[in-house]
Image (cartoon, rainbow, N blue to C red):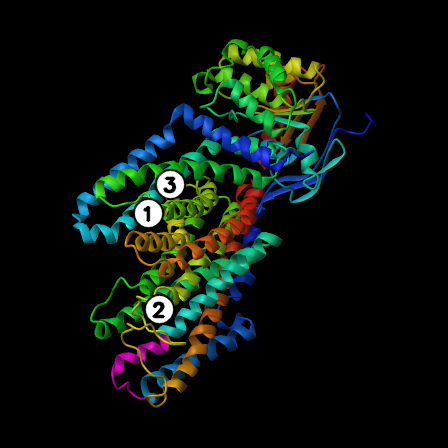
Amino acid sequence: MKTPFWQAVFAIARKDLRAELRSRELVNTMGLFALLSVLIFSFALELDRAARQESISGVLWVTVVFASFLGLNRSLAMERDQGNIDALLLAPIHRNAIFAGKLLGNFLFTLVVGLVLLPVMSLLYNMPLIQPWILVILLLGIAGFATVGTLLATMTVQTRARESLLPIVMLPVALPVLLAVVRSSTAVLNNAPIDDWIAWPQILIVVDVVYLTVCFLLFEYVIES
Amino acid sequence: MNEAPALIETRALVKAYDLLVVLRKLDLHIQRGEFVALLGPNGSGKSTLLKLLSGLTHPTSGTILIGGWELPGEAAAVRSQIGMVSHKTLLYENLTARENLQFFARLYNLANSNERIDALLKQVGLSKRGDSLVRTFSRGMQQRLSIARALLHAPDVLFFDEPYTGLDPDAATTLDDLLIQAQRDGHTIIMTTHELERAARLASRVLILSRGTVGYDAPASNLTASQLAAAYADLTHVAVGS
Amino acid sequence: MNAAQNIQSQAVPAKGASGFAAWPPLLRILTIATLIAILIGLYMGLGYAGTDVEQGDVQRIFYIHMPVFFGAFIAFGATVVGGIQYLRTRKPKWDTLALAGAEVGLALGLLNVVTGAIWARPIWNTWWTWDPRLTSAAIMCLTYAAYLMLRNGIENPEQRRRFAAVYGILAIVTVIMTLVVIRIRPDTIHPAVIGPSAQNAQGTFELEATRGVGAALGMNFPVWALLVPITLMWHRIRLQNRVDQVEAMKAEVLNQ
């Protein structure tokens, strides 16, 4: 009777990607915002080489998180504006397939922004950001942000304050992810010995798994009407 | 009147949003093939009733049966039997008409969806615009596509929630024809609307909800618009006066 | 017409039910016990315990500063329990518990941050420093302010309770962060009370070094970590029930 779980997940993610490829609203806004943010940070902080080394991962991650707010709000507002969330709820699919599908889309959009930022920041800040470990941390970090972000944005787009509420409710909850990614990428960029910082990616994996589980359990409660 | 098992049945259905009681012990029997127009002032519970019948919201108490399946417990079985058209389009504006239908065909796990989609686009008169973006459509075209979307998985029951909202006269006439066509094709239809004249003309049965219960229930075959308007004014007047 | 009469007839007993005499006996006892215990605790902290040799009198703020954090922890815990139970049972009383927990926890959390700042002024020579634990405690407070804002942004009461439950469950993450950050960020200068402090902790002290420190903490800890949050939450729940009664009367008029 029910549509297979993964078929529904991929249908939803594919629909988001197709709409995005067509309009490029999300990646354009997020990408432009991210570039501006990186430029403004370097302008405002007037960094010398040592300061750059210390602060570049902070700049990278704050930019990624803020860009992801834009993407998350757009992605969930798209389901709200024309009542589409009702259409998804009426379809014979598992509720969590909606979550997984939206999460997959949001993850990919934010990842694109992150992947564009790495070479750009490597150039602008003259730091070797394109390294395997940085990529691993980027994947894990964005997975964490996208997970809590998808759940919370589903909630906030339904409130009166709408888009403006997401950063306020999401930043504190994303804090453990933020702490772990900033710490580990700073250590990687400082060429610290791996034993000193390998705990951070490990913590990150644990946090991701915990968030994924909790958000899966809670999602059905934020889409009932 | 009719003792055949109802396709849609509610027993002592109550819906309260916190302390605000919207539906009070509603008993409803709707047979297969009926076209029910659901009238009533704003806040009388029309939309809430449709949300309950489609499983989008859960009853506070009471029973809902659709084709013998109980809501919300057996919602999975019910969902593939119902289609919904609302005053919102439930469509994605940055996808083409065809892509929208393909997406929902995947969600409903339909085989051979492409032929079905072609046939539906033809039925609602959008064959030539199938590959245009939905956001370039007029309101009337979007509404027709929403109907195609609702018909996609060939549901037994169709719910229309204020479908005439925002339609120009031409588009409204087209919608009339589509509704008549859908009933002829054997769909059971429940439509909420404020348009008394259309309700009297199109529907086979008219219900007026007032203060959370059925205040008026009559077959529409001999009903004229003015009779219906009189009954409506009578009921809503009482509701306001107390 | 008879709605007004209805309200009056309900308002009469409700009016008599306010005030000290109408509190449940246990709440009366608890409230008095809490007040007395606070006074004893203050005496123990301010008078009985000896003055810390290194820090002087300012150290005495610690008797409230540390227990009050655990009070906030208890209250935020109530928010999690209330949230989970609400999602399971859909009984509004659990949401009331969650709300009471968030508000009381926020108040106690702010007290914790403020007392910490007062202590830090002479000891660390600054009101505020971007220490991981301080930052994380401040973020914890902001999270619950966000929780209250989220509630405010939702008109439909059922939806509000549901979303609040979900967010209340997630928000506990920041409380746990504040607790563990001291262990995973070795650069903190905040002293650890239980177990060894970080190497660069500044302003730590020995429980045994000064007379009466253990006793004063032993007295104040249960007061601020248990009695105060529980009593405040109980009162907050009663207040909310009163608000709900008024809403119910309003709805009754509307439903007529």
Query: Residue B94, can we see it?
Result: yes
Looking at the image, residue C134 lies above or below residue A54 = below
Q: Quadrant of residue B15?
A: top right
Queried whether the magenta region covers residue C52, the answer comes back as yes
Are circles 3 and 1 on residues that touch, CB within 8 Å?
no
Looking at the image, residue C53 lies above or below residue A218 = below
| Position of the C terminus of chain B by quadrant | top right
Q: Chain of mark 3?
A: A
Task: Classify mark 1: helix, strand or loop.
Answer: helix
Residue under label 2, please give it: C112
Looking at the image, residue B147 lies above or below residue C46 = above
Mark 3 and mark 1 lie on one chain; the one further toward the N terminus is 1
Residue under label 3, please give it: A68
Q: Nearer the viewer, mark 2 or mark 1?
A: 1
Depth check, front residue: C199 or B143: C199
User: Residue C3: where, in percent of width, then height?
Assistant: 56, 47
The span shown in magenta is C50-64
Depth check, front residue: B61 or C253: B61
Q: Quadrant of residue C38?
A: bottom left
